[in-house]
Image (tube, rainbow, N blue to C red):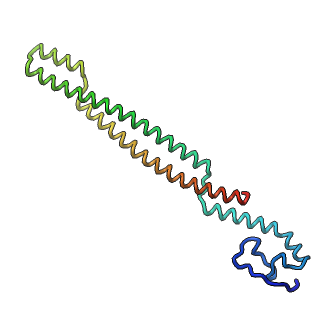
Amino acid sequence: MSAGKATPNTGQMGVESIRLGGMKVDDLPIGEAARAKMQLPEAEKAARQKSIEDIKARYPTQSVEYLRARILEAKKNIARFREESRRIGSDREQYRMLLYDARERDKKIKAAEERLEGKDLEEEIKALTKECPWQIDAMKKQVRQFEESIERFEKTIVKEQKSVDELTELLGQCQARDKELARLGA
């Protein structure tokens, strides 16, 4: 090699940082530069692969398609849970109305006991019970079960929404990763 001007490579990366005898490839004598330039594609390929690996290491590994599918699934779950919670809420309200009717029936029976006796009382109780056969304790228990179910659905909806938020954040990171990789042709 002949003596040429040395050029520092401080702050440069990849192929741009290559120095032979302290000189850039373009600053080498013609013959040496030609031989060095023949090897540059392999160095560029290695630098590109290293950049790809560095990008992949900085980001989550999931695919964008997978994350979109998981977000869609979680949103569908939330919609189903909300619908089921509304349905149970409607059933609960129907049971509350029936419970009200049963309490009114018991008041009527109590009033009948004060004014009737014997067979007349039995027939009145039978008629009121036939009209409203619900048992108050069983109805209260069912209303509590409905309320517990609604509460479980609400807690599950909160968890699913948190999952949607986390997955959406991951999706953004993976989309950024894919953009960086696309710029490198990967």
Q: Is residue 69 above or below residue 62?
A: above
Q: Is residue 67 above or below residue 106?
A: below
In this rendering, the count of numbered labels is 0
From the viewer's perspective, tell me whether residue 88 is left or right of residue 120.
Answer: right
> Residue at position x 12%, y 14% from top?
120
From the viewer's perspective, tell me whether residue 126 is left or right of residue 9.
Answer: left
User: Would you identify the image quadrant in which residue 8 lies?
Assistant: bottom right
**Picture coordinates of residue 147, whole percent (x, y):** 32, 39
In this rendered view, identify the residue nearer to me: 53 or 166.
166
**Picture coordinates of residue 92, whole percent (x, y):** 32, 33
**Quadrant of the rendering where the N terminus is positioned:** bottom right
The residue lying furthest to the right in this view is 31
The residue lying furthest to the bottom in this view is 3
**Picture coordinates of residue 176, whole percent (x, y):** 62, 57
> Residue at position x 71%, y 59% from top?
183
**Picture coordinates of residue 46, whole percent (x, y):** 75, 66
In this rendered view, identify the residue nearer to me: 43 or 176.
176
**Quadrant of the rendering where the C terminus is positioned:** bottom right
User: Would you identify the image quadrant in which residue 116 lies?
Assistant: top left
From the viewer's perspective, tell me whether residue 92 is left or right of residue 27.
Answer: left
> Residue at position x 24%, y 22% from top?
132
The residue lying furthest to the top in this view is 119
Q: Is residue 73 above or below residue 58?
A: above
